[in-house]
Amino acid sequence: MTKPAAIARLRAILEAEHAETLAALDALTEGPDVAALEAENASLRADIQKLNQHAHYEAWFNQTFGTDLRTPNTWPFSTFAQGTPWSDEVVYGMQRGEFLFAEHLMEKLDADGVPGDVVEFGCFGGTWLNTLADIIEKRANGRLLWGFDSFEGLPPPDPEKDGTIWEQGQYAATVEQVAASVRAEDRPFIRLEQGWFSDSLKREPATNIAQIAYARIDSDLYSSAVDCLEFLTDRLADGAILVFDDWQFSVNHGEVLAFREWIAAHPEFRFEFLGMNMWAHLYLRVRRGG
Ligand SMILES: C[S@@+](CC[C@H](N)C(=O)[O-])C[C@H]1O[C@@H](n2cnc3c(N)ncnc32)[C@H](O)[C@@H]1O
């Protein structure tokens, strides 16, 4: 056999034996390009990371509050498109439900004799301050209602700890606007205190507040929540209500991060989980000691 004939024969044998391999090679050459595969891979990795974070959050939530995670940002009537009259009705109804819940909690504080003032950290236009003022007025329970705010909007967020949803100066309303909207002049139990928490909570009259029965942390950012929780440490009464208005669904961000760090440093507190709604408002009853 000549040399070319021998080579041709060997090639034929190789091709017959490795037909499958050669077909796979052809398919690879004609298949999706490497860049597309890499992009798909990166998006899968991101999904897995999100799932892992979620699993970690669920475990932490359960361990801390002894209950399973409530679904974040649940929109209970999702077939009503947001902004339509029906969905507005739902929002109004749920808001009304939460206002009634706040009233119920205050009733219980009064009935149980839990002492202390009512405090909101972060007032903006005064919606919640007004609601709390109405409740206190109706119940005539003699509690003072404090509203702490810069009245210049948010301080600069830290993207690592707050994410990217908030902006410096967001939610600015002047102290005069808020005083008018909550009718502070007619209701002397309302005290509005202007300044950054890092300052206003460390001076009078804040430092004269001895006990707090109801606290709403509605200041969005991690560093703000750190200041509020530090202020609350020695002041929360046994049985007090603690509300987080911006419970981020991540153990490493915002109010959740501040709360995690705070409870790690203060094992004297225990918490009864009271509820969470679709706006991520988390309600807790606080117990001190044993
Ligand atoms: C979402 S708004 C509060 C909404 C309000 N509770 C309501 O019922 O409409 C957040 C508020 O927190 C205030 N705030 C956030 N961090 C602050 C800080 N470190 N010191 C003072 N005010 C702060 C902002 O000025 C803003 O008014």
Image (tube, rainbow, N blue to C red):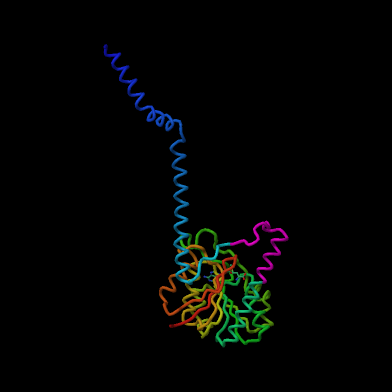
Asked if 69 appears above or below 148 in the picture, the reply is above
Asked if 32 appears above or below 217 in the picture, the reply is above
Residue 80 belongs to the span the image colors magenta: yes
Write down the region rendered in magenta: 74-96
Indicate left or right for 158 with 14 as reference: right
Indicate left or right for 143 with 231 as reference: right
* Quarter containing the C terminus: bottom left
**Quadrant where ligand 1 appears:** bottom right
* Quarter containing the N terminus: top left
* Residue 27 in the image, given as x and y percentages of width and height: 44, 31
* Residue 19 in the image, given as x and y percentages of width and height: 38, 27
Toward which corner of the image does residue 142 lie, by quadrant? bottom right
* Residue 14 in the image, given as x and y percentages of width and height: 33, 24
Indicate left or right for 190 with 235 as reference: right
Which residue does the image show at 64% across and 78% down from the upper left?
103
Q: Nearer the viewer, residue 56 or 231?
A: 56
Q: Nearer the viewer, residue 58 or 53?
A: 58
Toward which corner of the image does residue 72 lie, by quadrant? bottom right
Residue 271 belongs to the span the image colors magenta: no
Toward which corner of the image does residue 29 lie, by quadrant? top left
